[in-house]
């Protein structure tokens, strides 16, 4: 959830941006949200939340934030639909209606906060943290979806015990490789548009990959015990990735 001081930063941001640019960003945001709904990537509430995220990322981080967000959306949408029939038969398929607002904010809320916080501070580390959070969001979803579709027998990340597909904290080699590739792809889309170069790309991607492993660790431990849910795991994992990115940026 965005706090009052975050909303105040957003208001400051809007006041500092020329009106024509605000209108351009608003139009792009609307198109992005409508497109996401039309292709069933998100529900209606998810489209609204995605629009808020898109607007904040674009105003706070410019074309880099928007490019990174688009990369996350395309990769996760494609991975979710890859091998959908097999995932349906195993009971691990995501609903065809798409992700809800809570799911969107759990995965992208940290990146949004980083974009908003960057405006008054100008701290470039927040841009690395933002990219890391986006890379983790893509890496986590892609690794899970590809692993469930073609990854073979999943194993718990903590004990290597064989598990059923969709088991919290269980990973596959194919899923892990796909997740790493997704984190690199998002890092590249974000870093070069944001003009933070190869160094920034590697920091974003590495932090995102570490955050993905942290996600699996949380899933294999406290999520399996029912102490937290999947949305909380996703939020904490993007937070961990952002923290790593900020510390190393």
Image (cartoon, rainbow, N blue to C red):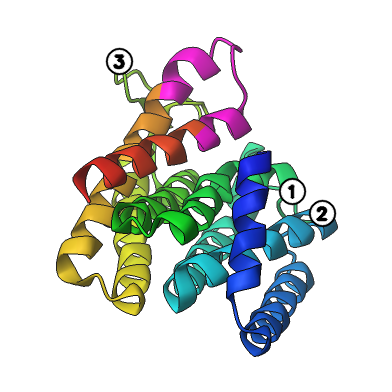
The secondary element bearing badge 1 is classed as: helix
Which residue occupies the foreground of this view, 81 or 134? 134
Q: Is residue 220 part of the magenta span, yes or no?
A: yes
Please tell me whether mark 2 sits on a helix, a strand or a loop.
helix
Q: Residues within 10 Å of mark 3 (few under 14, many from 20)?
A: few
Residue drawn where x is 29% and y is 51% of the image: 177
The dot on residue 45 is 2
Q: Nearer the viewer, mark 3 or mark 1?
A: 1
Q: Give whichever of discs 2 and 1 has the lower sequence position.
A: 2
Whether the magenta-drawn stretch holds residue 57 is answered as no
Image disc number at residue 159 = 3
Q: Mark 1 and mark 3 in contact (Cβ < 8 Å)?
A: no
Q: Which residue is mark 1?
A: 101
Mark closest to the chain's N terminus, 3 or 1: 1
Position of 158 with respect to 33 (left or right) is left
Image depth: mark 2 or mark 3 in front: 2
Q: Earlier in the sequence, mark 2 or mark 3?
A: 2
Give the CA separation, mark 3 to mark 1. Answer: 34 Å
Residue bounds of the magenta highlight: 218-235
- Name the chief secondary structure element in magenta: helix
Quarter-of-image position of residue 178? bottom left
Q: Residue at x 31, y 18 (%)?
A: 158
Relative to 100, 61 lies left or right: left
Q: CA distance from mark 2 to mark 1?
A: 5 Å
At which x and y percent is residue 134? 44, 55
């Amino acid at each position: 959830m965005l706090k009052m001081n975050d909303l105040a930063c957003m208001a400051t941001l809007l006041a500092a941006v020329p009106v024509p640019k605000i209108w351009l960003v608003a139009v792009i945001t609307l198109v992005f949200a409508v497109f996401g709904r039309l292709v069933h990537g998100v529900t209606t509430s998810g489209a609204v939340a995605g629009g808020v995220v898109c607007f904040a990322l674009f105003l706070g981080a410019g074309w880099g934030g928007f490019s990174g967000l688009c990369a996350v959306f395309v990769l996760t949408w494609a991975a979710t639909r890859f091998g959908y029939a097999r995932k349906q038969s195993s009971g691990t398929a995501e609903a065809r209606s798409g992700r809800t607002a809570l799911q969107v904010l759990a995965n992208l809320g940290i990146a949004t906060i980083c974009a908003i916080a960057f405006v008054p501070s100008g701290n470039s580390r927040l841009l690395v943290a933002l990219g890391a959070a986006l890379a983790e969001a893509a890496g986590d979803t892609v690794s899970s979806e590809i692993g469930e579709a073609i990854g073979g027998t999943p194993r718990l990340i903590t004990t290597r015990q064989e598990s059923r597909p969709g088991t919290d904290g269980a990973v596959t080699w194919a899923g892990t490789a796909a997740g790493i590739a997704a984190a690199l792809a998002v890092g590249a889309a974000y870093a070069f548009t944001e003009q933070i170069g190869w160094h920034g790309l590697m920091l974003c991607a590495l932090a995102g990959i570490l955050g993905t492993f942290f996600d699996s660790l949380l899933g294999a431990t406290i999520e399996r015990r029912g102490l937290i849910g999947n949305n909380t795991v996703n939020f904490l994992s993007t937070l961990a990735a952002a923290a790593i990115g900020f510390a190393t940026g």
